[in-house]
Image: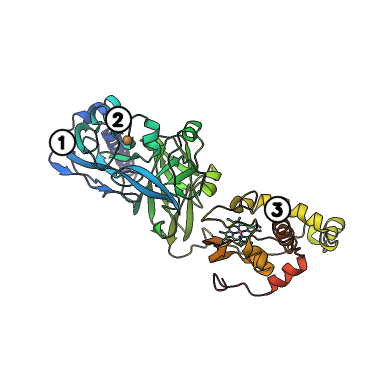
Amino acid sequence: MKPKLELKKQSIRIALAITLIFGMLSCTKNENKNAQDYQSIEAVGKKEAELTAPPFVPKPIGDRAAMNLIVNMEIKEEEGEMVDGVKYTYWTFGGSVPGSFIRTRVGDEVEFHLKNHPDNKMPHNIDLHAVTGPGGGATSSLVAPGHEKVFKFKTINPGLYVYHCATAPVGMHIANGMYGLILVEPEGGLPPVDKEYYIMQGDFYTKGSYGEPGKQPFDMNKAIKEEPDYVVFNGKVGAVTGDKSITAKVGETVRIFMGNGGPNLVSSFHVIGEIFDKVHVEGGDMINKNVQTTLIPAGGSAIVEFKVEVPGTFILVDHSIFRAFNKGALGMLKVEGEENKKVYSGTTQEGIYLPEGGTIQNMPKEKGAAKSVVAKTVAEQIKSGKELYGRTCFACHQPSGQGIPNAFPPLAKSDFLNANPDRAISAVLHGLSGEITVNGKKFNNVMTSQHLSDEEVADVLTYVYNSWGNNKTVITPAKVKAVRAKPAPKASAEH
Ligand SMILES: [Cu+2]
């Protein structure tokens, strides 16, 4: 019995030693290689690189050998829409912002053809952060409209890299959308995942402020002061929301190649309701795990990966949060599939909260009673209505009720408002959408329900009716209560 046991122990030891040695070998295979080693990889064969517009990426490299890769990149200056009604002339690599995604592997030899479309007005070039050489290629690639420049480089560092135009004024070329990502996969390729997407943040500077309609030129002064009007994912407000959201199914692993073109801001990239299982920090080899928010420098990147466990809409944001909700840095990932109640159960119960042992059944006397029983004078209503307006309505309808043409209707001298108080109450209570005409101008937008109490609605509307040349109607909480009791109108049905 005894010798047999000894033997068994020994063979386990040998097996352990072997796995250890092999483990070390496979480690040295990739992780200890450096740019010097990758220089000596020979490129075999030739092919044209597949390029894609965001949010899509070319097919994974897999384990193909290093080769000669031809990249055909066309620069186009073209008008696009920053947000509904706001036109902007973008300068683009490949017709999109960010520019076409380039996917290579370490050791590839890239023959880069940079073409400047004859209809363009400006010379441009390209600086790829994946290039080891002067200007990242910029010094060899300056190209006039109607011309093509060719230069070559070898990828000797794996990672996810930003490319951008570096023609003076550099900041202006980048601010107009001239940036994108080039991925250099490690030997053997990145581990396969279910879904891969390409998103890049950028900040934009326009003469008019956010939402001001019409054609908006670039504003150099705001750019120098680093005060963007727009901070967006993929070149415009709403490029990755609604029916343009990225998608996945429950159980899938999502990989986002996330870049930041700047020109100025650093991104605090976060997905609301998800945790990044893995982050390739700054697009390099180092993998951090279980990350909530990852910093992406201007001119930098990150690869984030996470498995989606539950269905729903997950919001992608720059967690410098005013940028997300007021300047456009917001995208959506829509996940379909079965609920997973273990991971997330939704609201399980809503009950009455009774503090201090749960025996007190009455509201504390003075405060509550004074608030709901004593009627305010009109002057008091106007006073609290003004405060409320400053907290809720002014963001859209503007400080003096003047509104924003084509987006938010005026409340000042509004014929729509003055004609029908019940309709105004209903707009604040239930929201308003569909086409309406205010002072002869058409609006077709959405005002969301404002979630205010009867008293608050009465106060804010009394303030509005008694300001800016309106007809001085007084709205009482009782009147609001009466409108609230009626069913909500269907969108646009009554306008
Ligand atoms: Cu340029």
3 vs 1, front mark: 3
Q: Can residue 266 be seen in this view?
A: yes
The image quadrant where one finds the C terminus is bottom right
Q: Is residue 20 above or below residue 48?
A: above
Separation of residues labelled 3 and 1 (CA atoms):
67 Å
Give the residue pinned by disc 1. Answer: 43
Query: x and y percent of residue 74 in the render?
Result: 25, 42
| Disc 2: CA contacts within 10 A as few (<14), some (14-19) or many (>=20) | few
Give the residue pinned by disc 2. Answer: 32
First in sequence: mark 3 vs mark 1: 1
Question: Under tag 2, what secondary structure?
Answer: loop
Q: Is the residue at mark 2 in contact range of ligand 1, meaning its CB lies under 8 Å from it?
A: no
Number of marks in the rendered image: 3
165, 250: nearer the viewer: 165
First in sequence: mark 2 vs mark 3: 2
Q: Is residue 383 above or below residue 339?
A: above
- The reply, left or right, for residue 82 in relation to residue 452 is left
Q: Residue farthest to the left?
A: 45
| Residue type indicated by callout 1 | Ala
1 vs 2, front mark: 1
| Disc 1: CA contacts within 10 A as few (<14), some (14-19) or many (>=20) | some
Separation of residues labelled 1 and 2 (CA atoms):
21 Å
Query: x and y percent of residue 341 in the render?
Result: 52, 63
Q: In this view, does 422 lie above or below 149?
A: below
| Disc 3: CA contacts within 10 A as few (<14), some (14-19) or many (>=20) | some
Give the residue pinned by disc 3. Answer: 388
